[in-house]
Image (cartoon, rainbow, N blue to C red):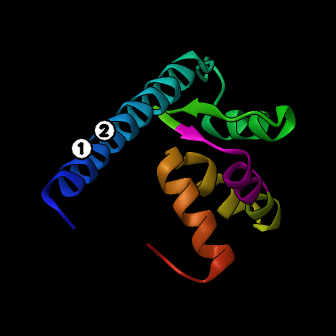
Amino acid sequence: MNDVTEARERSVKRMVAEAMADVEQVHRDDLARTVRALPKQGKLSTFEAVKKVVEDKQCARIGGLLVDGVTAQVIVKVHAALNDENKKKLEAMGIRKMADTAWRLTSGKGR
């Protein structure tokens, strides 16, 4: 290759990289805006808020974390399978520990 072709190739690669960085920033900004716009948990308990996510089929911020429908469904199913004593323990957990426990019980793996 000659010097002109190599210079053009470097220039094109640089322009593509800059364009991709701009696109990624727009996506991050959109995601952040979407998460901020999600309704907060309000006066519901953590577990009630999780059940609401399942019922509404809409992710929500619970305890400062974004909880998706799949995680909420796993928590609700694990809760239904527990005895009364362990249900109370699960309900008393924070959302992060609740989700980790539910996933651990369903998959047999921990973080």
Residue 34 as seen in the image, left or right of residue 17? right
Measured as percent of width and height from the top left, residue 42 is found at: 61, 17
Tell me the tag on residue 105: none
Tell me how far mark 2 sits from mark 1, CA to CA: 6 Å
Measured as percent of width and height from the top left, residue 26 is found at: 45, 26
Nearer the observer, 82 or 39: 39
Magenta segment's dominant SS is: helix
Q: Please, what is the three-letter code of the amino acid marked with disc 2? A: Met
Q: Secondary structure at mark 1?
A: helix
Q: Secondary structure at mark 2?
A: helix
Nearer the observer, 21 or 65: 21
Residue 33 as seen in the image, left or right of residue 70? left
Do callouts 2 and 1 mark residues in contact (Cβ within 8 Å)? yes
Residue found at x 49% / y 45%: 94
Q: Which mark is nearer the camera, 2 or 1?
A: 1
Occupied quadrant, residue 89 = bottom right
How many marks do you count on the picture? 2
Which residues lie in the magenta part? 66-76
Q: Quick one: quadrant of the N terminus?
A: bottom left
Is residue 5 part of the magenta span, yes or no?
no
User: Which residue matches tag 2?
Assistant: 15
User: Which residue matches tag 1?
Assistant: 11
Measured as percent of width and height from the top left, residue 78 is found at: 74, 64
Q: Please, what is the three-letter code of the amino acid marked with disc 1? A: Ser
Return the residue found at the far right. 55
